[in-house]
Image (cartoon, rainbow, N blue to C red):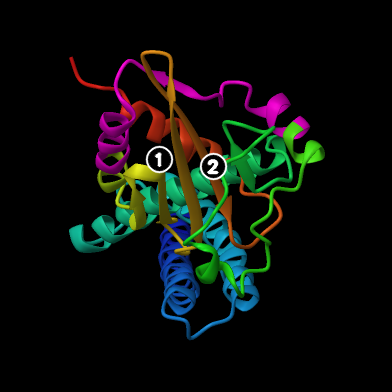
């Protein structure tokens, strides 16, 4: 029993060290890319490696802590192991969900509420000059995949004037911490850049607002600058933006 207990404690210690390595790798990968000191491919490889490292750390910590109950030594060591375990499990589950989302999401990165006549980028075009993904809409093939995967992404009808709708759009964009490039109320156009949370990828958004009867019709388009699949990011962004635009009261 004593030998088994020592083995469990050793496994927990190894798991804590593995977690530390994984934390350094993920921080270096994401931080290096965001600071523009590491190209995308090495950063992505490092991130994928950190996912495997964290999963391994979770396994070692679980086995060690379950087998070593009552023999884990100091409170400090116990605390480190618990923190490492919680963070490892959290990151592992998050990445499993991300991988699952990648499996069910179509391989597209340009989402628009109007797939027949999508809003066009104007002032944001110079910012996309070196982007791998061109600013033009790809057409019916992308539209068909979007309509099948995200049928709820449709234009928003508001019972307010276009000027009032533009004010709501600007407020929503600021609430979502987008970088506003253009707010052309007279043209019914808003352009902005959204930055993703982890790697800091730049995605471009254009909002088009036109008069519709006694109210306004709002169309939104969100497009990634790089990558084949956006793993549902642009659709989620549009849904959140539409919800933010709803007038209060």
Residue 75 in the figure: left or right of residue 61: left
Front label number (1 vs 2): 1
**Position of 248 relative to 119 (above/below):** above
Residue 68 in the figure: left or right of residue 94: left
In the image, residue 28 lies at what x, y percent? Answer: 45, 77
Q: Residue at x 68, y 54 (%)?
A: 136
Residue 161 in the figure: left or right of residue 212: left
Q: Start and end of the magenta stretch?
A: 144-171
Quarter in which the C terminus is drawn: top left
Q: Which of 25 and 145 is in front in this view?
A: 145
- As for residue 176 lying within the magenta part, the answer is no
Residue of label 2: 221
- Tell me the SS state at disc 1: loop
* Residue 52, image quadrant: bottom right
Q: Which residue is drawn at 48% across and 64% down?
A: 199
Q: Which of 158 and 29 is in front in this view?
A: 158
Please give the label number shown on residue 188.
1
Report the residue that reaches farthest toward the bottom.
Answer: 37
- Tell me the SS state at disc 2: strand
In primary-sequence order, the first of circles 1 and 2 is: 1
Whole-angstrom CA distance, mark 1 to mark 2, is 14 Å
Q: Nearer the viewer, residue 34 or 132?
A: 132
In the image, residue 62 lies at what x, y percent? Answer: 47, 48
* Residue 101, image quadrant: top right
């Amino acid at each position: 029993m004593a030998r088994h207990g020592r083995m469990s404690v050793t496994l927990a210690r190894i798991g804590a060290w593995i977690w530390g390595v994984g934390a350094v790798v993920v921080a270096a990968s994401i931080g290096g890319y965001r600071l523009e000191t590491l190209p995308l491919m090495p950063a992505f490889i490092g991130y994928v490696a950190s996912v495997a490292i964290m999963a391994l750390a979770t396994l070692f910590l679980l086995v060690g802590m379950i087998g070593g109950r009552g023999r884990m030594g100091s409170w400090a060591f116990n605390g480190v192991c618990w923190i490492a375990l919680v963070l490892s499990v959290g990151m592992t589950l998050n990445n499993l969900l991300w991988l699952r989302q990648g499996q069910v999401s179509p391989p597209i990165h340009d989402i628009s509420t109007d797939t027949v006549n999508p809003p066009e980028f104007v002032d944001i075009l110079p910012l996309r000059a070196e982007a791998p993904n061109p600013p033009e809409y790809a057409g019916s093939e992308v539209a068909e995949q979007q309509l099948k995967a995200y049928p709820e992404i449709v234009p928003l009808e508001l019972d307010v004037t276009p000027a009032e709708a533009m004010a709501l759009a600007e407020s929503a964009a600021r609430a979502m911490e987008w970088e506003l490039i253009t707010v052309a109320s007279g043209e019914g156009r808003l352009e902005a850049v959204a930055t993703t949370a982890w790697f800091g990828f730049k995605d471009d958004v254009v909002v088009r607002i036109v008069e519709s009867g006694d109210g306004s019709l709002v169309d939104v388009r969100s497009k990634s600058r790089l990558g084949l699949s956006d793993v549902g990011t642009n659709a989620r962004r549009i849904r959140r933006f539409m919800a933010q635009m709803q007038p209060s009261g």
